[in-house]
Image (spheres, rainbow, N blue to C red):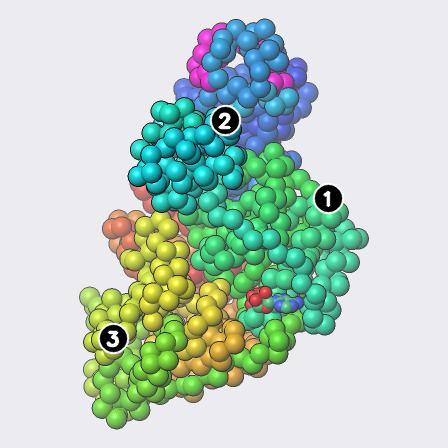
Amino acid sequence: MTIASVIVDVPSMAIDHVFDYRVPERYEDSLEEGMRVIIPFGPRKVMGFVVKIKPDTDVVQLKEIHEVMDYTPVLTKELLELGTWIANKTLSFQITSLQVMLPQVLKAKYKKELWLLAEEIELTEALQTLFAGRVVVSFEEIEERNIPYSQIQKAIKDGNVEVRYIVKSKETKKKITWAQPIDVLQLEEALIDIPKQAKKQKAIVEFFLHNPEPVPMKKLMERLNTTRSTVKSLTERGLIEVFEKEVYRDPYENRDFERTEPLPLTEEQSEAITPIHRSIKESAHEVFLLHGVTGSGKTEVYLQSIQKALDKGEEAIVLVPEISLTPQMVQRFKGRFGSEVAVMHSGLSAGEKFDEWRKILRKEVRVVVGARSAIFAPFENLGIIIIDEEHENSYKQDDTPRYHARDIAIFRGEYHQCPVILGSATPTLETFARAKKGVYQLLTLSKRMNNQSMPEVEIVDMRKELHQGNRSMFSFPLQERIRDRLQKHEQIVLLLNRRGYSTFVMCRDCGTTMQCPHCDISLTYHRKQERLKCHYCSYEIPMPQTCPECGSESIRYFGTGTQKVEESLQQTFPEARIIRMDVDTTRRKGAHEKLLNQFREGKADILLGTQMIAKGLDFNNVTLVGVLAADSMLYIPDFRSSEKTFQLLTQVSGRAGRHELPGEVVVQTYTPDHYSIEMASQYQYDDFFQYEMRMRKRFQYPPYYFLALVTVSHPNNAYVVQVTQKIVKSLNHMSMNRTQILGPTPSPITRIKNRYRYQCMIKYKNEPNLYENMKSIIQQYEKEIQSKDLQISIDFQPTQMM
Ligand code: ADP
Ligand code: ZN
Ligand code: ZN
């Protein structure tokens, strides 16, 4: 007897374990671990993943697998193990942890088709009868005809047929139209016959005389500036034929990537790369922190490390933050490794993502460059994993399973015995502390290429501006420099640093902000009750009418939208051409890229945007970067606000003067003496690290303490408070001496979609039973969660405190 252990697609605590099923005879030889199956579950039929195949079971009343969905496993053995690991580490359901590794197309219910790729004659008789001259058949038909599973599986292995999933009817298979000459000799004659006036027709004929290969219609029309009807008249003359060809949905298909060669490394670069190469050569897992200032040539180190892994016959994963995954960035990898590269990011349609994923599964590519979820690329022979800008928040998934890509990278690096490289100009404190302790190996690039200096940063005190009677958002020094650049036709980047929302209170006269005396974070303004609350502990005070420091009445909460800034900017500089980039102007697919291209082509003088413009951009002509309100990030209610401010200011400064023209940076702030602003303007990462570490130690934050954030939500506020209180009580009961349970307190965003939110925070050093304890607490609420719409979420090592 063959038994399959299956994880079923029912996300519930009671069902979060494997169930055994009997494998029907017709699947016995072909079912593999990592395939998806349809199984009976209670009265329903549900999907499940086969995680183990074994000869026997203790289960007495066995049910049978109803259907096998895949012909090749969609999850490798490694990824199945990783799934269990994620479930344990993040306290999420096993099914959720497995699903997260797969492209969307495989998660939902899509229609399945079988496509013929080879000559029909290569198929078995049964399959020949099935296709009967067609190239595609539906799966319903296959089931009706009872065609043996193993035959189809073999045909797939031989590359004769292929399974395709129909996402949306029009997206399924992407075809493009091509044109080609029927007979080149005919073209020469035709050139004489075509009437003089038909210039466009002539142009096409001439084009094909020189390039007799097929070309995509679209390219042809763009190149010769002609239309479909002109091409049509040539097809009617029998000169050209038009045909359709299916393509992979490759979002970069219309771009030619210029090939690049490895650059001779600088001394610093080769010093950094030597231990990485050694680790690849010796197949020894090690985590490296590549700490390099902006423009120090980290990417070249990545590229030549990847090359080393490829030379050894291995594969590479490169993670870059979603927002930096610009065509410029893609070019750097495709330019070096060409068609070996798959690209995965959220801008792709479900179909496009699926195609890129399939290229990996079929071993058609060996390098994947992508955002967070690319860490699950189903490679089986990994030789290197790189996480660029490792400090970025987006590497943590903020929905279940709440994993951090860095942890997954290290899991996979250990599994494959290969190096993991974390790269950043401003590593997180956690990472840098580990590097200092020798847990990670520290590699340093301290100089910019060609010894270019970092741009000069000027800090402008906005309190002084106010006292000088300047009530606008643009300080006099900034205005002066903008005017200067406009005159010289050089470009300007203005950052309005506004993170989602801002609810902190600040005195515009003296720069004082209202902080919690216990937690060293800003108090959050609650408009309804006119109160300020700490959302870590339960401290709260009424909203003051005057500044407690200087008595000024200019105390108010902070925040301006980009649109308002744009209007005011346009008023101040009527002649300036401005591009605004924020969530509103970049909502449409491709808009982000389009705006950046316009700016690159010099179609605007000023690029005004939120943090999405801070990263990775590299423009020749930008010589001035302005940060309009450096403070707004400083006072988000998050213990990492200083660190995030330091990171952002460093990143954005790195945008200026990357080429021949020297750059300048102007930072506007109400708190010019704040250490993170001061140190960022001097590029003092090490000093910042030491200072901030002392703060973390004093207030007992990471990396000295671990954190876990429990958030409870429900439409009824009183109920939420009550549940959170009970949880705090149980946690206090269960935890060790040195562990602190803070709260309950309202979440910084107190209500989302009509659900009230309360939270409590666990600060701990050593809490071996925390996972078990949390699990048993949630278990107590299982009934309410299932039937009363209660939600309890827990985030270990949270990066967002919202
Ligand atoms: P980082 O990623 O550290 O910010 P980049 O990788 O963008 O830095 O490198 C900055 C610039 O230096 C790029 O234009 C890159 O092509 C160039 N560069 C990198 N390494 C070398 C080298 N060894 N020789 C010459 N130019 C280099
Ligand atoms: Zn004041
Ligand atoms: Zn507090």
The dot on residue 313 is 1
Whether the magenta-drawn stretch holds residue 142 is answered as: yes
User: How many residues crowd around disc 3 within 10 Å: few (fewer than 14), some, or many (20 or more)?
Assistant: few
Check disc 2 and give the amino acid type: Asp
The furthest residue to the bottom: 468
Q: Which residues are magenta?
A: 136-155
Rendered view: 799 above or below 111: below
User: How many residues crowd around disc 2 within 10 Å: few (fewer than 14), some, or many (20 or more)?
Assistant: some
Residue under the point 70% across and 65% down: 264
| Towards the viewer: 527 or 577 | 577
The furthest residue to the front: 192
Quarter occupied by the N terminus: top right
Residue under the point 54% across and 51% down: 257
The mark that comes first in sequence, 1 or 3, is 1
Task: Report the side of 226 relative to 144 (left or right).
Answer: left
Q: Where's residue 360, x and y in %?
A: 59, 39
Q: Tell me the CA gap for discs 2 and 3.
A: 56 Å
User: How many residues crowd around disc 1 within 10 Å: few (fewer than 14), some, or many (20 or more)?
Assistant: few
| Towards the viewer: 555 or 302 | 302
Is the CB of the residue bearing disc 2 within 8 angstroms of ligand 1?
no
Task: Report the side of 482 relative to 763 (left or right).
Answer: left
Query: Is residue 182 among what the camera can see?
Result: yes
Query: Is residue 106 among what the camera can see?
Result: no
